[in-house]
Amino acid sequence: MKIFSGKQIYDADKFTIEKQQITSEQLMERAAIQIFNWIHSRLQGAQIKIHLFCGIGNNGGDGLVLARHLNEHGYNIDVHIVNYSDSRSEDFLINLDRLKEKGIWPNFLNEDATFPAIAQEDVVVDAIFGIGLNRAPDDWVQNLIVHLNNSQAFILAIDMPSGVFMQDMVPSSEGAIRANYVLTFQVPKLAFFLPQTGVFVEQWEILDIGLDWEFLQGMETDYELIGKNEVLAMYRPREKYSHKGTYGHALIVGGSYGKIGAVTLACKGSLLVGSGLVTAFVPKCGYLPLQSSFPEAMVLTDSAEEKISNIDFSISPNVIGMGVGIGTHPTTAQALSNFLDNNTIPLVLDADALNILSETPGLLDKMPAQSVLTPHPKELERLLGKWENDFDKLRKVKEFSQKYDCIVVIKGAHTITVYGNRGYVNTSGNPGMATGGSGDVLTGIITGLRAQGYSALHAAIFGVYLHGRAADIAVGETGFQALIASSILDHIGKSYLDLFKVVEPEDAKEEKGK
Ligand SMILES: NC(=O)C1=CN([C@@H]2O[C@H](COP(=O)(O)OP(=O)(O)OC[C@H]3O[C@@H](n4cnc5c(N)ncnc54)[C@H](OP(=O)(O)O)[C@@H]3O)[C@@H](O)[C@H]2O)[C@@H](O)CC1
Ligand SMILES: Nc1ncnc2c1ncn2[C@@H]1O[C@H](COP(=O)(O)OP(=O)(O)O)[C@@H](O)[C@H]1O
Ligand SMILES: [K+]
């Protein structure tokens, strides 16, 4: 699913209005009725106090239309206008008049206003700012936001949590609504998926307001949300007359004394996603543990006992996963540098291989084109230097990706795979994955997919999805705390099977807001 910028959404709005020959005010009515239906189907007329906080633009206009419908259905509402500017939108004004015609006079909140008391059991509808936010809210509006957040009431935000920008950082951690639920129009918004702004969105759901589908489909976007439908299109079926040679040979290079398990995890990941063969290249101390714990893998050893000192092998793998458990000993760094001088085999680079690349000048230039890098936040910082915020981080990663023609997998709660100017935002995974070794499994998965002939970009996007989905299935058996990297491995098979599972309507509901 594409993730659009604010400007693209306004363009789609305009196009839809012209094509469907409707007014903007009719589109607002349509959007707000969707919100009303969502609330009405859940509350069924319950007399809970609903406070609607409406700005003076179209997000506020949505709030006013919603207020009118709630009133017509007998709900117990209070409408507050957050009067942060004199430039009220036309559709806001039309709907303000309609509300007044119904005998509802909103409470106008200005700079010196006393904020209304809100009980914990009330519901707050946040319609202060939507996608039009373009500067930090005034201090008094920020104080109101703090007041609403502190109320402990359930907060339902329309389109965006107020104070969260479409493509910029929230000015302060207190400056935006912490929404329990966001009902967002038509398309997901990038800010929902970044660590610094995603915290303002506990759950979200898309409401289809009928923006022109063809127009949306035809628009190129910088970001895409990756779920089952997107990866299904990448899936490569197993052929009947195939053999193990058909599915490639993955080589995992890594390990050092005390960190041989990382290589075992990566080797298992490669084979479990379907690579035909997997070989490990490890220091001598890794030979026995690998051979005895994972008989399906072949093992080659370095001449050194405890660390990689010379990456030299006589096999012909079609991809190498490099770096898990490898350490940053100067001998190993030199071995990596020497290896890169002559290597043309595609690479997946992780962990200390990335740290060595960051620390050794000129090494990044030696990466073959389309290498896949899988840094966690600290490793990414070593590669890029510090960033100002998550949006700045994405800009820097895109520059890096273009400079070195590589794919960067920014690991996190919503892992984002970046190639060139595009980012692919993953939707699978859970906090149970914050456990040692889960990244090693991912390296193996991506390497194993690449071995089978997936392009570097598809191997990264698909691999990240499968990895997270396996953990999502596993967590049903283990819970978050007891999920370990091996649990992810144990469920890779089910995550493949899940791709083809027909979703029942009830399940479909549960998948929303992930
Ligand atoms: N296709 C769709 O998705 C549909 C969307 N719809 C709804 O429209 C919403 C977008 O509405 P919107 O463009 O009027 O912007 P909104 O967020 O209400 O802000 C209002 C104005 O405030 C201003 N302003 C900005 N920052 C400020 C600040 N810090 N302090 C003070 N003022 C500030 C700025 O105006 P400016 O002052 O810059 O001229 C801005 O224009 C969208 O989120 C959705 O709810 C539906 O109705 C129909 C279909
Ligand atoms: N809170 C979270 N939600 C979803 N996925 C997570 C979360 N925390 C970590 N992960 C995933 O777990 C993996 C951790 O990788 P990494 O930090 O390299 O682990 P390790 O070095 O221990 O192998 C990444 O794929 C990351 O996206
Ligand atoms: K809002």
Image (cartoon, helix red, strand yellow):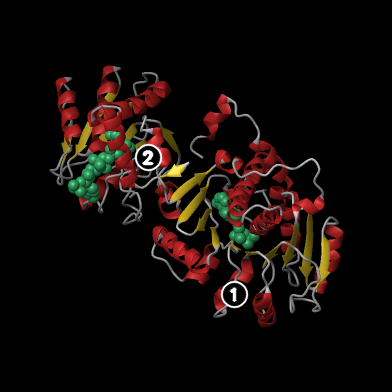
Is residue 179 depicted above or below 345 in this figure? Answer: above
Residue 421 vs residue 409, the one in the foreground = 421
Residue 233 vs residue 118, the one in the foreground = 233
Left or right of 511 on screen, residue 187: left
Left or right of 355 on screen, residue 219: left
Residue sitting at x 42%, y 55%:
196
Q: SS at mark 2?
A: loop
Q: Earlier in the sequence, mark 2 or mark 1?
A: 2
Contact? badges 2 and 1 (CB < 8 Å): no
| Residue 1 visible | yes
Percent x, y for residue 396? 43, 65
Residue sitting at x 31%, y 46%:
7
Question: Ligand 2 within 8 A of label 1's CB?
Answer: no
Left or right of 106 on screen, residue 467: right
> Residue 24's image quarter?
top left
Determine which residue is flagged by label 2: 152
Question: In the image as oriented, which residue stretches furthest toward the left?
Answer: 86
**Numbered marks: total:** 2
Determine which residue is flagged by label 1: 366
The Cα–Cα distance between marks 2 and 1, rounded to whole angstroms, is 54 Å
Percent x, y for residue 248? 75, 56
Residue sitting at x 38%, y 65%:
388
Is residue 227 depicted above or below 349 in this figure? Answer: above
